[in-house]
Amino acid sequence: MKKSQLNIFSYRDYRSFIKDRLAELKAADSKYSYQFLATRLGIASKSHIKMVADGRHNISGELAARLGQIFELNRREQEFFLALVDYGQAADERCKQLALERLCSFGSFSKLHRLDLKQMEYYADPLMLALREMVELKDFEENAGYVSARLPFKVGATRLRKALAKLLELGLLERDAAGRLRHCEHHIATGDDMRSLAVKTYYRQRFKEAASALESPSDRRRLGGLTCAVSRDTYKKICDIMEESLGRIYVLLDGEEEAEEVYQLVTAFYPLTRPLSDEKKAGKSISVSKGDKK
């Protein structure tokens, strides 16, 4: 069997690796196919591995280990492949974070994805998030005393230096001809991609901060909300209005010349009710457990 020329440590999706490794093997020997892999693995369903690669099925740890052997992965590559499987199939964010930590223990992975990992760190670090905006304040001073005085948590000189170094490395800040820090671009928007672990971390922390803002004086914060019944069409229209409003805010902020404070704006529009199944929509009875009956 042909030894793989693929760098498995460059992958973040084990399903993509399965597809690429199979294609590599098939190019060298036409007998290789998803059905052939299933036969080698001794599983009854000839389409199971294809469904795994397509994201329709998950793969067990035992089967993944045997597949790694068929792919002729060495011990280190095999360990990485199993960690990649755990990352891709994590049942919750804690499991996903633990799997990511395992991936990061492989130096090749951390090196290849260094900027992506630092981007994740940016979203998770309240200091970096605040610092990026603080440099735009008209009285900003690049020292720990100033930063600590303006933020609700203590910041030491070492932590400040490291945070600024990461922001510069990520290209989120730069220095002008006089050495003063400034934005490379004015604002970062997370977009609507909630699949990313980094973005989920970002929103979780921002909404916690929004809750704590209830303790701030009313003239320094603005909170509002409503609960409403809507159709799917109205939901989409409200999302469009929210997106348009954020666009108008970006334009307003781009014209800001003498910022005095750093504010955090988060928006959320999410369901409280769950959709009915097709059977319940069709009018079939809804079962009630004994513990729910009165």
Image (spheres, rainbow, N blue to C red):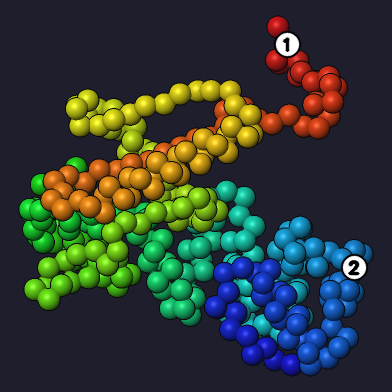
- The quarter holding residue 58 reads bottom right
Q: In which quadrant will I find the N terminus?
A: bottom right
Percent x, y of residue 116: 43, 68
Report the residue marked by disc 1. 293
Q: Is residue 133 above or below residue 51?
A: above
Percent x, y of residue 200: 47, 49
Disc 1 and disc 2 in contact, CB within 8 angstroms: no
What amino acid type should be assigned to the residue bearing mark 2? Lys
Percent x, y of residue 191: 46, 53
Report the residue marked by disc 2. 46
> In this rendering, does residue 127 appear at all?
no
Left-right relation of 66 to 253:
right
| Residue found 64% across the figure and 34% down from its top | 232
> Label 1 crowding class (10 Å Cα cut-off): few <14, some 14-19, many 20+?
few
Real-space CA distance between mark 1 and mark 2, rounded to the nearest whole angstrom = 46 Å
| Residue found 30% across the figure and 64% down from its top | 185
Q: Secondary structure at mark 1?
A: loop
- The quarter holding residue 117 reads bottom left
User: Which residue, as the protein is rendered here, is positioned at the far right?
Assistant: 44
